[in-house]
Image: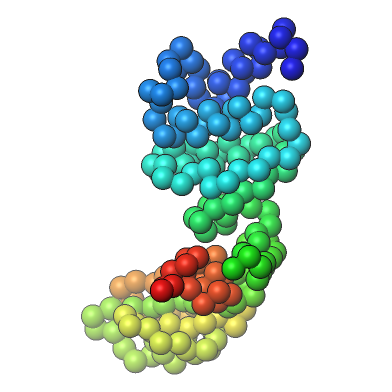
Amino acid sequence: MPRSERRTRADELLDRVGLSAAADRKVRGYSGGMKRRLDVAMALVHRPTILFLDEPTTGLDVQSRTALWDEVARLAREDGVTVFLTTQYLEEADALADRVGIIDRGHIVAEGTPRALKADIGRPTVEVIPSADGDGRVAELLSRFGQLVPSARGVAVRLDGSEAGLAEIVRALDADGVTVDNLELHRPSLDDVFLAKTGRSLEGHGAE
């Protein structure tokens, strides 16, 4: 990069990652989150079209992690940068990635959009906890919308169709005068996908 552009570009990137106020401080005094944001700024100096980030948010607090998420999303959305991101935080992959590849023992065992991967392993489940004076109609009512599944707290059904079934269940409960203490929609997560594809929740978990 020409010398004449360096300062302008440095100031631009420090502002972009929220470090302008700390620009005159020595890096060894930065927090972990500040150092990660500085790493991203340094990687962007030459305006890359492809960026590799290796677990950039490991060990960060929630605020610093969220700030990095925002910057990674902006890189893809506004600058058109292709970002390859490795992470052990599956909610991070779900929030940021257009496509996800799950690697197990050096092999890609699943690949696709987060939505498609979650849909591949199961449908959403609705769990209903009847009120204290609950009645036995809940199970019969829910069975109209799919297959009843075990629930430790109440009655649960795996929906035959989409999440639109949740609204239909609420209307049906109201129409039948059934009162409930709680109603929750449980969607399959990427954690569920990882467990289904690898047989464990985290890489190496349970290994001797």
Of 178 and 208, nearer the camera is 208
Q: Is residue 5 left or right of residue 150?
A: right
Compared with residue 62, is residue 30 higher up or lower down, i.e. above or below?
Answer: above
Residue 131 visible within the image: yes
Q: Residue at x 45, y 29 (%)?
A: 34
Quadrant in the picture for residue 13: top right
Residue under the point 33% across and 83% down: 152
Residue 49 % position (x, y): 76, 36
Quadrant the N terminus occupies: top right
Image position, residue 182 (x, y; %): 34, 71
| Residue drawn at x 72%, y 43% as measured from the top left | 82
Q: How is the image coloured?
A: rainbow
Whether residue 172 sits left or right of residue 5 in the image: it is: left
Towards the viewer: 30 or 12: 30
Tell which residue pokes out farthest to the front in this image.
208
* Residue 123 visible here: no
- The correct choice, above or below, for 14 with respect to 72 in the image is above
